[in-house]
Image (cartoon, rainbow, N blue to C red):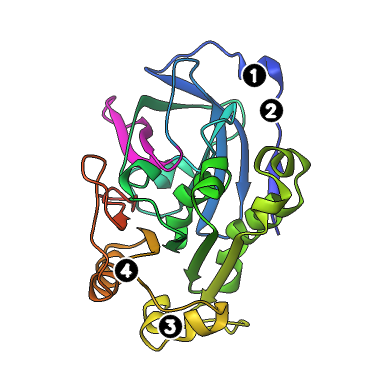
């Protein structure tokens, strides 16, 4: 179902031929629409879990073709991981989906973003609301010890059309719960705070429905055994399609939560630079 190719140290140290070049170390394809890849990390790059960078390839016109991609790996990782859609006619992903270990991509080492802990006021419970490849920044935050230090409960929702599209997130949650390094880094007692809530909208699965519907009708809270959204205790981050972001934001605001930013922390934040090819 999945395929992964390794890279040797010899290829990882290949001389860069592109501006801001980094070398691809592994590629894993999940469906005909989704894939993940890892690249070398610039020694000078420092970022907060949840931020994004500009990555890309050289275009046919000889100029860099760049898009914003959330970094899916945590800030302590020695490599950088990305999770991407494949768009047949997409200016970038039509090419990016064919990368192999040893190839190079362009990576501008200037991370930015709103999905960071600094943009939220202290709280007791945090929700990560995601659709599709919007799971990527939360893949970073879920492996960051600060997430579990800051909250008593960590809830990640992931909504996709088909079951196979949940594979990346499901595998990551399993690795967090079973990886000895993460257990030591985060602590087994902290990992017990993690709640995973996947749903599908087309293909039948154990839980179906748009997360917006499940928030509105109260199923989300009933299933998890938690009270409805409360601005006093609950915090949230949103990353998905533009329509999804708008709809979830409206529901959070109805519950009394306010949108925050790095300069003015509040109760929730939205990723405004979510990658969709052609942006």
Instruction: Tell which of 34 and 144 is nearer to you.
Output: 144
Seen in the image, is 163 located left or right of residue 232? right
- Can you say whether 160 is above or below 49 in the image? below
Q: Spatial distance from mark 4 to mark 3, Cα to Cα?
A: 13 Å
Q: Spatial distance from mark 4 to mark 1, Cα to Cα?
A: 40 Å
Q: Which residues are magenta?
A: 49-70
> Which is in the foreground here, disc 3 or disc 2?
3
Residue for point 31% across, 58% down? 268
Residue for point 54% across, 61% down? 153
Q: Spatial distance from mark 1 to mark 3, Cα to Cα?
A: 47 Å
Within the magenta stretch, is there residue 274?
A: no
Residue for point 51% across, 62% down? 156
On the image, the x and y values in percent for residue 172 come to 63, 53
Verify CB contact (< 8 Å) between mark 2 and mark 1: yes
> Residue under circle 3?
214
Sequence-wise, the earlier of marks 4 and 3 is: 3
Q: Spatial distance from mark 3 to mark 2, Cα to Cα?
A: 42 Å
Verify CB contact (< 8 Å) between mark 1 and mark 3: no
Callout 2: helix, strand or loop? loop
Mark 2 neighbour density, 10 Å: few (under 14) some (14–19) many (20 or more): some
């Amino acid at each position: 179902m999945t395929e992964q190719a390794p890279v040797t140290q010899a290829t990882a140290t290949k001389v860069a031929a592109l501006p801001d070049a980094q070398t691809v170390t592994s590629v894993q394809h999940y469906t005909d629409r989704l894939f993940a890849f890892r690249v070398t990390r610039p020694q000078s790059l420092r970022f907060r879990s949840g931020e994004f960078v500009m990555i890309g390839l050289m275009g046919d016109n000889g100029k860099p073709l760049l898009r914003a991609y959330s970094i899916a790996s945590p800030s302590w990782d020695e490599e950088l991981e990305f999770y991407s859609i494949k768009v047949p006619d997409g200016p970038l992903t039509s090419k990016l989906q064919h990368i192999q270990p040893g190839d190079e991509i362009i990576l501008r080492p200037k991370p930015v973003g709103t999905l960071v802990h600094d943009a939220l006021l202290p709280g007791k419970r945090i929700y990560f609301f995601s659709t599709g490849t919007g799971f990527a920044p939360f893949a970073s935050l879920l492996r960051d010890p600060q997430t579990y230090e800051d909250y008593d409960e960590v809830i990640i929702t992931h909504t996709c059309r088909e079951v196979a599209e949940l594979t990346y997130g499901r595998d990551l949650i399993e690795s967090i719960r079973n990886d000895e390094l993460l257990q030591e880094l985060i602590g087994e007692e902290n990992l017990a705070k993690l709640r995973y809530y996947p749903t599908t909208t087309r293909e039948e699965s154990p839980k179906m429905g748009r997360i917006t519907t499940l928030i509105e009708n109260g199923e989300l809270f009933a299933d998890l055994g938690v009270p409805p959204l409360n601005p006093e205790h609950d915090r949230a981050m949103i990353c998905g399609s533009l329509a999804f972001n708008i709809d979830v934001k409206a529901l959070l605001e109805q519950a009394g939560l306010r949108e925050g930013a790095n300069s003015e922390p509040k109760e929730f934040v939205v990723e405004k630079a979510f990658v969709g090819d052609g942006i």
